[in-house]
Amino acid sequence: MIKAQVLVAGRGKAGGIKPASSPDEAFEVAKTLLSTTIKGEKVAKVLVEQKLASKHERYLSIVVDRSSRCYTLLCSTEGGVDIEQIALQSPEKIIRHKIEPLIGLQTFESRLVARRLGYSGKQMNQVTSVISKLYEIMLDYDAELIESNPLIETENGELVAADLRILLDDNSLFRHQKFLERMKTFEPDMTDLEVKAREKDLAYVELDGDVGIIGNGAGLVMATLDMILDYKGKPANFCDVGGGASEERIASALEIVLANPRVKVLLINIMGGITRCDDVARAILDIQKKMGITKPMVIRLVGTNEEEGQRILAAANIPSLNSMEEAAAKAVELIPKVK
Amino acid sequence: MAILIGKNTTAIVQGITGSQGTYHTKLMLEYGTKIVAGVTPGKGGTEVQGVPVFDTVEEATSRFNANASIIFVPAPSAKDAVLENIAAGFNPVVVITEGLPVKDEIQIMEVARLKGTTIIGPNTPGIITPSECKLGIMPGHIFKQGKVGLVSRSGTLTYEIAASLTAAGLGQSTCLGVGGDPVVGLSFVDVLEMFRKDPGTEAIAMIGEIGGNAEEMAAEYIKNTKYPKPIAAYVAGRAAPPGKRMGHAGAIIMGRSGTAETKIEALKNAGVKLALKPGEIAKLLKSR
């Protein structure tokens, strides 16, 4: 089997795993794979593995259970396929076991799940140990997901983890310096601007529209995007400068959003809480001067120190609107007027 | 009447000497919140905004009576700070800090559950009972005392909607952000239950967003309890692509789950009035 080494889920379905029956064929398959992109990510490496005749495929994972505020073991007697599909079609094949947060997963619990997955004897002991180890990895690596899919049982009864996926918790990276370092060395599934935004610690997601958006607060920016859609416009990005945004952060956000060539109009939506409107106003003027911004801007600025912020903008002849609706409508209205 | 905090709330601020801690202590004091002490390890004996600072919570509580706390400690030390506050018996404990690892949040919530402590947050703007007490970072002037309870997963959207409620003449009983992280102390169901029991709350504004299933669970609860007070809701993130984190750690569509559409559908089916724009919440509550 030739497997594309890409950081995406569902690579099999996307054509990233191909069989080969001779070294020559393997060479050809690998060559083709290495020239493709899977779900937007270039294939830089492939893994060549022995093809296994599997008798059974199972699914093992540990997830963060948001509503129960704990880790939960999520397993299924059906592996190799999309777990969401199984959850929809045959929910009875899914085994859920909540893990007690303070004492953690006990061996008897791993064994209980191994039994429910249908294992017995030596295999049961093996799977018990695999489940317990997955939990150890989950904690040691601060993962938010660990998924062994499929766990294969070969015709002669051997157990093989044919695929394994770990999602790390970005918020935990301060205690995992080696991962922070490693992140710099590979090409993530991100655009250049998204990478740049991450370096500046800004929440930025690129989309395919033409209205550039900057706001403070994730919910507010999401709502701004939704509103642009409702006014029949297309957002070019999500960009949240967050709470307590300094002048410097706002300037970086402006730089990144405006570096996207698709952006025709810039909509800035600030509802000040921690963010002070006068900081925002000064940052906008500063960067406008430095970058010589010619693209039209629509600004909505209310909240802490709003009078001061609006006064600074007005003194520089930049109008600011009071409502989010007005600002979103205005931004969409300007699009056809921009060449 | 209100929920969780009010006139009798006296609080300590943990992480009071940091820039956010100091700035917001000033704003909370100006709003009228009774802040009796601050805590920052290593800064004991100093003063911030006239508030005495201690090295440990224990020293602060031996000198002053406090029943609530608010935390501005940076993420790497936040778990320790929250646990110190839970141990001191404060209730509620408001955790403003953003960026806590999920593993820490899971442990914190379990300890809080065992001790019976209500955690607001992490990654929250906090909580305000207008004209009585503010334990948070929200601009106080946009809120007005009244009868609408507001619960939200987002900070600035809370301000947006509270301001429009106030402008429409609809005051608020209590407004709180449950927090934007995957694991937080309060669910929509928890808060709806508190508002249900609160005689001072007559209607509810609920602000959800993509990710997880807190809105779907709220819908289920509203249906099952034949919720006795009118609810208007707004759910952000219809334009969000799957698999991308939209600012909040918890705002992510995983595969097919956690989309705005399924949440809106579930809430509608439970009889909740849905606003297409944040500004419409006030209209929906006014027209009832």
Image: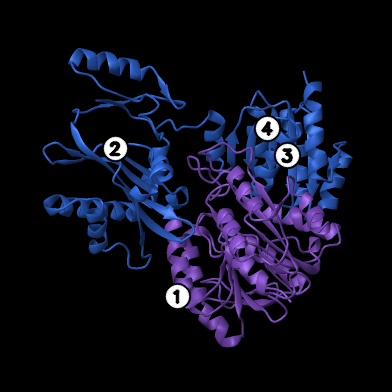
**Which residue lies under the disc numbered 1?**
B114
Task: Give x and y (percent) for residue A171.
Answer: 47, 51
**Which residue type carries mark 1?**
Leu
C-alpha separation, residue under disc 2 versus residue under disc 3: 41 Å
C-alpha separation, residue under disc 1 versus residue under disc 4: 45 Å
Give the residue displayed 42% in from the left and 22% down from the top. A37
Chain coloured blue in this rendering:
A
Circle 3 chain: A
Q: Relative to residue B165, is residue A198 drawn left or right?
A: left
Q: Relative to residue B163, is residue B157 drawn left or right?
A: left
Task: Give x and y (percent) for residue A304.
Answer: 77, 56
Same chain check for tags 1 and 2: no
For the residue labelled by badge 4, is the local secondary structure a helix, a strand or a loop?
A: loop
**Which residue lies under the disc numbered 4?**
A235
**Which residue type carries mark 4?**
Pro
Judge whether A113 appears above or below A79 on screen: below
**Which residue type carries mark 3?**
Met
**Which residue lies under the disc numbered 2?**
A163
Task: Give x and y (percent) for residue A226.
Answer: 69, 39
C-alpha separation, residue under disc 3 versus residue under disc 4: 9 Å
Circle 1 chain: B
How crowded pointer 4 is (Cα within 10 Å; few <14, some 14-19, many 20+) is rated as many
- Which badge, 2 or 3, is on the more N-terminal residue? 2
**Which residue lies under the disc numbered 3?**
A227
Task: Give x and y (percent) for residue A215.
Answer: 69, 43
C-alpha separation, residue under disc 1 versus residue under disc 2: 38 Å
Q: Say which of B61 and A8 sits in front.
A: A8
Chain coloured purple in this rendering:
B
Judge whether A253 appears above or below B43 on screen: above
